[in-house]
Image (cartoon, rainbow, N blue to C red):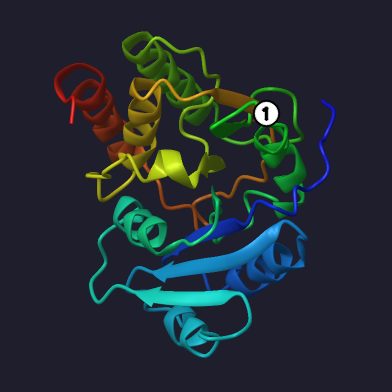
Amino acid sequence: MHVTPSDPTLRVSVVIPVYNEMQTLPTVLAKVLARPETWEVVLVDDASTDGSRSYLQGLDGTDRIRVLLHEQNQGKGAALRTGFAAAMGDVVLVQDADLEYDPDDYPVLLAPIYAGKADVVFGSRFLGGPHRVLYFWHSVANKTLTLLSNMLNDINLSDMEVCYKVFRTEILRKIRIQSDRFGVEPELTAKVARLRARIYEVPVSYYGRTYEEGKKIGWRDGLAAFWWIARFGLFHRG
């Protein structure tokens, strides 16, 4: 797709939830800060115990970096809720602290917003970008969850569970996040669909990790996602 150059009038806040990612965190943060699109980085440590927390505390107050700390581990949704509330940019982009997603994809993710065509942009691991070949049943679960979410929300995403989600801040301020863990993905999807936001989807690269390399989401989270999709797609209108 054509990539629109950066819009200097739009300030991009990158929100990064962190939980025990010391092996990859310095590299990810360096790549995020190297991107010209990044106006500020908001890092939320969710009570890490592997050194990530002390590393981030040493960075707090550094140019363009703000660090927020959870005293107890609460989950990705809770970390995003904290980070979103603190973000001061015009656009908020979600970045994981591992190396599964590449900040070099920021121009593609932001292009529909820079062009004035989108309020929300989802990345997609299934639209043709390079990706590491890994777990078959994970891909089946992702596509099944996305299909159910699409049916209940009347949209046609290809990858609802993707990390890379970008929001105009004015849209994000209308959403009250209730999920503490990975239910935040179907919750955000359902709520932007209900707002009738202009949603675009773009291909992104994906360098998935194995469980031995630190992957955290598991089959229990997949089962829980069915409940969150049903809750926010059928029963919950708040």
Amino acid type, residue under disc 1 in the picture:
Val
* Res 231 → quadrant: top left
The image shows residue 210, relative to residue 27, as above or below, that is: above
Which residue appears farthest toward the bottom when viewing the image? Answer: 58
Looking at the rendered structure, the secondary structure element under dot 1 is: strand
- Mark 1 Cα-neighbour bin, 10 Å: few <14, some 14–19, many ≥20: many
Q: Give me the residue at 32% from left, 50% from top.
A: 77
Q: Give me the residue at 31% from left, 34% from top.
A: 187
In the picture, measured across the screen, residue 194 lies left or right of residue 212, that is left
- Residue 153, x across and y down, in percent: 35, 15
The image shows residue 174, relative to residue 78, as above or below, that is: above
Task: Quarter of the image for the N terminus: give it.
Answer: top right
Q: Give me the residue at 42% from left, 17% from top.
A: 144
- Residue 204, x across and y down, in percent: 69, 36
- Residue 20 seen in render: no
Which residue occupies the foreground of this view, 105 or 25?
A: 105
> On the image, numbered disc 1 is attached to which residue?
202
Which residue appears farthest toward the left when viewing the image? Answer: 235
In the picture, measured across the screen, residue 84 lies left or right of residue 42, that is left
Task: Quarter of the image for the C terminus: give it.
Answer: top left
Which residue occupies the foreground of this view, 55 or 116?
A: 116
